[in-house]
């Protein structure tokens, strides 16, 4: 399972005034349960800050579309462990609301926005798009394309965009994940311009992002707030035309039909 978050006991921003007595130490774990059961023995004098990223087991429940009894028990135990954390660092208001809904007091939550993993200046030299997309504006998806990401809406929207709309965009998938092969095959069958390449090394990410005319974020509704769209910060810092389709019809707040019409009319 991917890291759910970061546990730390050091001094950070607004957390300093909320809980005194920090000592420098940062610890990572595969979820909140690993450390908290024995935290009083490991850190008897240190409060715990928990910087949450993706919510587990909520992600598993969202993918299944139901909550079997074992997962329900797992979720109950997870929230019991979360309530033992001294202070949460939430990445955004959606996470803060989820934590409060789960019984975490608002005075134990501070907002600490995510930062870009690489420097972004806005003057990066873009890489050359794949030759197969020559003559098209570039719609770029970069990163992991897996269970939390929309597939059918993107495919249907791009098909309509080319058959009923202006047809100016080609899709560049610089990505990996279980949905990539399906998207590429279905778009090829529909004669939609699409190219799939391997994700680039982190140091090359700014130049890749600079090559896009529009960036695609495809988070499915049921995953809103419980997973982090990791490309939002570096793209927005780059002052790109980030997610113009999503701005017209946000993926997390509108119906599938509205999202398809938004892509079609781009």
Image (cartoon, rainbow, N blue to C red):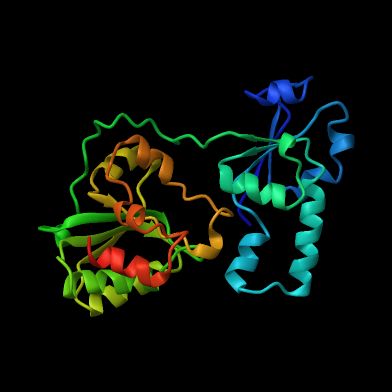
- Residue 61 in picture, x, y percent from top left: 65, 67
Decide which of 146, 232 is in the foreground and name it.
232
Please identify the quadrant where the N terminus is shown: bottom right
Q: How many marks?
A: 0
Q: Is residue 161 left or right of residue 121?
A: left
- Which residue occupies the extreme bottom position in the image? 189
Residue under the point 32% across and 47% down: 242
Q: Residue at x 68, y 26 (%)?
A: 15
Q: Is residue 219 above or below residue 181?
A: above
Between 23 and 241, the residue placed more toward the observer is: 241
Residue 26 seen in this snapshot: yes
In the picture, which quadrant includes the C terminus? bottom left
Q: From the top left corner, tell me how far across and down residue 178 is, in percent.
A: 45, 68
Is 50 left or right of 239, judged from the image as shown?
right
- Quarter assignment of residue 88: top right
Can residue 184 be spotted in the picture?
Answer: no
The front one of 139 and 185 is 139
The residue at 82%/52% (across/down) is 80
Q: Is residue 195 above or below residue 229?
A: below
In the rendered image, the residue lying farthest to the left is 135
Percent across and percent down for residue 19 are 77, 25
Residue 38 percent across, percent down from the top left: 86, 42
User: As displayed, is residue 177 above or below residue 88?
Assistant: below
Residue at left offset 21%, top offset 41%: 126
> Which corner quadrant of the image does residue 70 belong to?
bottom right
Left or right for 54, reference 179: right
Task: Answer left or right for 177 relative to 14.
Answer: left
């Amino acid at each position: 399972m991917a890291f759910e978050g970061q546990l730390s006991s050091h001094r950070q921003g607004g957390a300093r005034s909320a809980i005194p007595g920090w000592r420098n130490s940062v610890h990572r774990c595969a979820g909140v349960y690993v450390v908290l059961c024995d935290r009083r023995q490991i850190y008897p004098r240190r409060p715990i800050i928990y910087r949450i990223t993706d919510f587990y087991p909520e992600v598993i429940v969202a993918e299944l579309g139901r909550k079997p009894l074992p997962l329900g028990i797992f979720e109950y135990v997870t929230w019991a462990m979360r309530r033992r954390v001294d202070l949460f660092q939430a990445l955004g208001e959606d996470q803060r609301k989820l934590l409060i809904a789960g019984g975490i007091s608002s005075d134990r939550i501070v907002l600490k926005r995510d930062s870009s993993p690489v420097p972004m200046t806005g003057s990066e030299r873009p890489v050359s798009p794949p030759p197969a997309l020559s003559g098209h504006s570039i719609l770029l998806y970069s990163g992991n394309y897996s269970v939390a990401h929309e597939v059918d809406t993107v495919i249907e929207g791009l098909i309509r965009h080319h058959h009923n709309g202006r047809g100016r965009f080609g899709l560049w998938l610089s990505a990996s994940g279980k949905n990539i092969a399906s998207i590429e095959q279905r778009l090829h069958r529909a004669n939609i311009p699409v190219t799939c390449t391997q994700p680039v090394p982190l140091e090359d990410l700014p130049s890749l992002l600079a090559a896009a005319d529009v960036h695609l974020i495809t988070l499915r509704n049921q995953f809103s707030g419980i997973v982090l769209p990791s490309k939002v910060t570096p793209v927005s810092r780059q002052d790109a035309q980030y997610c113009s389709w999503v701005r017209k019809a946000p993926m997390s707040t509108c119906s599938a039909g509205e999202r398809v019409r938004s892509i079609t009319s781009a």
